[in-house]
Image (cartoon, helix red, strand yellow):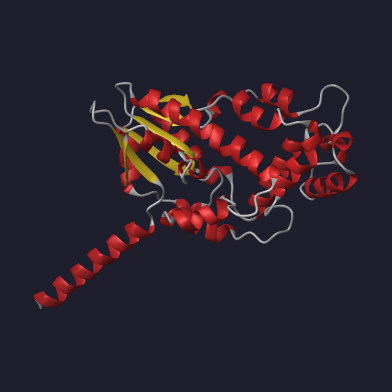
Amino acid sequence: MKKPIAVLLFVLFVLNLKAQEERRFFFWEMTDTKSKNVTYLLGSIHLGNSKLFPLPEKIEEAFERSDVLVLELDLNSIDPFQLAHRAMYLDGRTLKDELSAKTYRMLINKLEENGITEDIANFFKPWFAAMIASIFYYEGEGLTAEYGIETYFLRKANEKGKTLSELESIDEQVNVFDTMPDSLNDMVVEYILSGVASGIEFDTEKLIDSFISGNEKELSSYLFKDENLSEIDLLFQNRLLFDRNIKMAEKIEECHKSNKIHFVIAGAAHFLGSNGIIDILNKKGYKIKRL
């Protein structure tokens, strides 16, 4: 009788290991040869669903050991009036004034489908209106900020009284879009909505699954466009990722040099690829271990 029990226990052990492998996520430990300092790095999806949870124990345990939670942006510190001042027209201009008739109508239709009237939408700057439309799209696909990785850990950090820090300020994030030349407004809107609210098929379930499994090649196929890059593609690639990755890596390096354990969360796209944060930190001589 003992043999079948031993076989059953072995099968359960193997299945448990397989389950853990299937929920690998994008999680790294950063160390160096000059100190005993440890920094944890977690790639995230800003909008998620219940499939993301529960998170692997290794991630939860690392968070518990950490002294400081570092987000791309400290969501506790956002001033809605400051954001509105940057994201809306306060000088008499309107959304309609700044877009071609075709792009304007497409964007307005997307917003009206979700309850935002044309009168209200006309106060929005093009990049902000497009972002709202894209969020509505993702919510329609079942992805919400409520199930986002940042939201989850911010809530836990607030409950436990952990120190919060950020890789960027709200102004730095807004500047990525708000300092674009007005002549590119149509391209900016089309870029933000490409593959999302523009009607192109986008499989959010496969996106979530590739994130959960930690499949870098598969997730990268959703996040990066490698071939036939247009001028606007290259502009956004540099503004949204490469330029910010350099600054984020510098901030992470500052955090690491302190005597506290930092748990850093940023969008997974910032960590991956040849110009990602992991690549930058590796080149600086840090040891980055995938957990």
User: Which residue appears at 50% of the width and 40% of the height?
Assistant: 270
The number of callouts visible is: 0
Horizontal side of residue 29 vs 220, given as left or right: left
Q: Position of residue 289 (x, y in %)?
A: 31, 43
Question: What residue is shown at x 58% (from left), y 57% (from top)?
Answer: 204
Q: Is residue 4 visible?
A: yes
Picture quarter containing residue 201? bottom right
Quarter of the image with the N terminus is bottom left
Question: Which one is in front, 238 or 132?
Answer: 238
The foreground one among 216 and 203 is 216
- Relative vertical location of residue 29 with respect to residue 259 in this rendering, above or below: below
Q: Is residue 237 above or below residue 22?
A: above
- Image quarter of residue 215: bottom left
Residue at coordinates 35% horizontally, 42% vertically from top-left?
28
* x and y, in percent, of residue 87 in the image: 73, 29
290 lies left or right of 195: left
245 relative to 204, above or below? above
Picture coordinates of residue 200 (x, y %)?
70, 59
Answer whether residue 158 is visible to the viewer in this image.
Answer: no
Residue 249 horizontal/vertical position (percent): 44, 31
